[in-house]
Amino acid sequence: MNKHLNLIGILLGLCTLTSFQPKDEWRTLFDGTLNGWETYQSYRHTTSYNGQVPKDQSGKPIAPIGYGRNEANVFSVVRQEGVPVLRISGEIYGCLFTKEEFQNYHLKLKVKWGTKKWVPRLHEPMDSGILYHSQGECGVDYFRSWMLSQEFQVIERSHGDFWCIANSQASIRAAMPQGKDTLVYNRRAPELRMGSVKEGNHHFCQASGNYERSMNEWNELELICFGDKSLHIVNGQVVMALSKSSYSDGEISKPLVKGKIQLQSEAAEVFYKDIMIKNIDKLPAAYASYFE
């Protein structure tokens, strides 16, 4: 009898400990394999690309490479310093995207550039990106490579820039500094609507500053999404805050607050690791002032 009581006590103790474990624990999205991810490849774009469907020599439209393909081993897992790392070569435009959808979360990962660049960006900064709240089919953007989404740009010397992808929209506090022709995030500036033809037709906003480390170092990026708000954080610095995330469906704006996560292949070799995510039930208090 005492043995049974002791066993029951132990089990109750374990249940009690489990019930007090936090529900917002980090979990990995990259376990050293591509399990949990899917692929899409569009085209090997050239410098003559103009937004139209590429055509062959006879003028016939070329079909995209498509889903579930990995030509040229664009997406692969390599080991660096004994640790599995996701490599995206960039040779073909496209993306690696999660099978799961996410809403109200904190994402963090590390990114580092490789050395290879490809046409049509041989003479442009190395470029990739984290596309979030991704919905629908791939190939609806200008480069016919990605889903409707919001972009946390990963680009040399300006990690954290924002792009509307396809018909996405958002509101950002931004201004155009004297001598520049680009909007830059400024938390003290008036709020501007991005992706709206009626309100200036802006689709891009530059990060507030360059906090990227040297080319051979890992950068830690964080994306916090709660409700219609999101924050782009680079090596601990908030460089972008957006709200009223939505997309246009004809004349109607609809909420864009959840979806898959895409990692872009965009003509540059890039490495990702330590891709982690956790659910959140509110915007962290430390960042509330960015939306006041």
Image: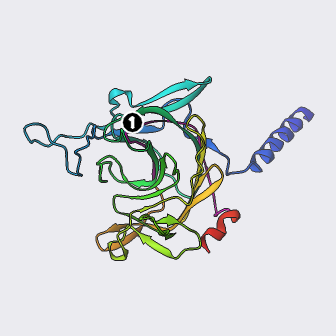
Picture coordinates of residue 126 (x, y %)? Answer: 44, 42
Q: Is residue 60 above or below residue 279?
A: above
Q: Please report the residue visible at 28 percent of the width from the left and 48 percent of the height from the top.
A: 144
**Quadrant in which the N terminus appears:** top right
Span of residues in magenta: 260-284
Picture coordinates of residue 75 (x, y %)? Answer: 42, 32
Q: Is residue 26 left or right of residue 6?
A: left
Q: Is residue 98 visible?
A: no
Q: Quadrant of residue 47?
A: top left
Mark 1 — residue? 90
Q: What secondary structure is the stretch in magenta mostly built from?
A: strand
Picture coordinates of residue 163 (x, y %)? Answer: 42, 58
Most distant residue in the right direction = 2
Q: Is residue 33 visible?
A: yes
Q: Give the SS element for disc 1.
A: loop
Scheme by which the image is coloured: rainbow
**Type of amino acid at the residue the image marks with label 1:** Gly
